[in-house]
Image (spheres, rainbow, N blue to C red):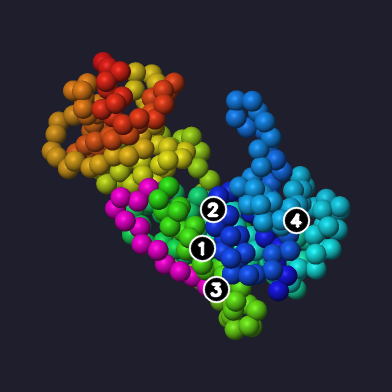
Amino acid sequence: MKIIFLGTPDFAVASLQALIENSMNVVAVVTAPDKPAGRGMKLQQSAVKKYAVEKNIPVLQPEKLKAPEFLEELRSYHADVQVVVAFRMLPEVVWNMPPLGTINVHASLLPNYRGAAPINWAIINGEKETGVTTFKLQHEIDTGNILLQSKVDISEQDTAGTLHDKLMKEGAALIVETLHQVEKGSLEEKPQIVLDEYKHAPKLFTETCLIDWKHTTEHVYNHIRGLSPYPAAFTIVNDKKMKLFTCSKIIDTHQHEPGTLLTDNKSYIRFACIDGFIDVHELQLEGKTRMKTDDFLRGNKIA
């Protein structure tokens, strides 16, 4: 089959690499235009583009996905199927172009956690299990017929970062298996069945990241690791934003107001929750770099 791959970040590279290493015929890659970044604001290529260039795969970088010249170039490849991993929303004229349709890899067990941040919300909500799904694109986002799914355990220590890496590898393996079965004609598409307790994964905003200490330690612990390392949960200390990356729970009865900061200014920083404390292991105070708590306290004292 002739395959066109659409994706941008590192998460997508693993799937593209898996296709290439399994000798699949990727005829072109569609990715985001180069964007200025860094101190010098030099143009930076997407992770997918860097890999595609390295493998001598033609790269398309449209500003507008409905632009006639882009659509004409896309059609010229006569692809049998398109694969989408971590790319922007496609217009119907693009996803409906190949005869075998367009297959998306989504980092959740659909229909749960449809949306922009499935990895984060699975941890924030305290899930013990998530997974990846391959499905056919249709009009409404993340609603197409399911092709294959694979489950992944979420450990008590997982952060959004570590779970991202687990799902990235699992998704790469699943898209290869999906395409093998598509080529054989052995896949049965299954409509998504949405139950009342269906869970969402909306885009993350600044207000999502602000920690509310008037919850249990379990709730706050999940919130912090579900946003680590990016965009990172934060609280306000002495009028400055403090991002928290890794932490642990201390269940303990106390009389402190939720949000009270406790420290010996040597080795620990703890915040009070309603049933105990969050012990902070890694943090970043506004204007500072990310560091371990004891390293931070060696150069910074908290009133």
* Highlighted range, magenta: 145-160
Q: Residue at x 13, y 38 (%)?
A: 253
The residue mark sitting in front, 3 or 4, is 4
Q: Nearer the viewer, mark 2 or mark 4?
A: 4
Residue 193 vs residue 79, the one in the foreground: 79
x and y percentages locating residue 242 in the rendered image: 38, 27
Amino acid beneath label 4: Pro
Which of the two residues, 294 or 206, is positioned nearer the viewer here? 294
Q: Residue at x 31, y 56 (%)?
A: 155
Alpha carbon separation for disc pair 3 and 4: 24 Å
- Number of residues whose C-alpha sits closer than 10 Å to that of mark 4, classed few (under 14), some (14–19) or many (20 or more): some
Residue type, mark 3 in image: Glu
Question: In the rendering, which numbered label is found on residue 177?
Answer: 3
Callout 1 secondary element: helix
Residue topped by disc 2:
11
* Picture residue at 67% right of the left edge, 60% below the top: 5
Q: Is residue 216 left or right of residue 209?
A: left
Q: Kindly identify which numbered label has been placed on residue 171.
A: 1
Q: Give the label on residue 58, or none.
A: 4
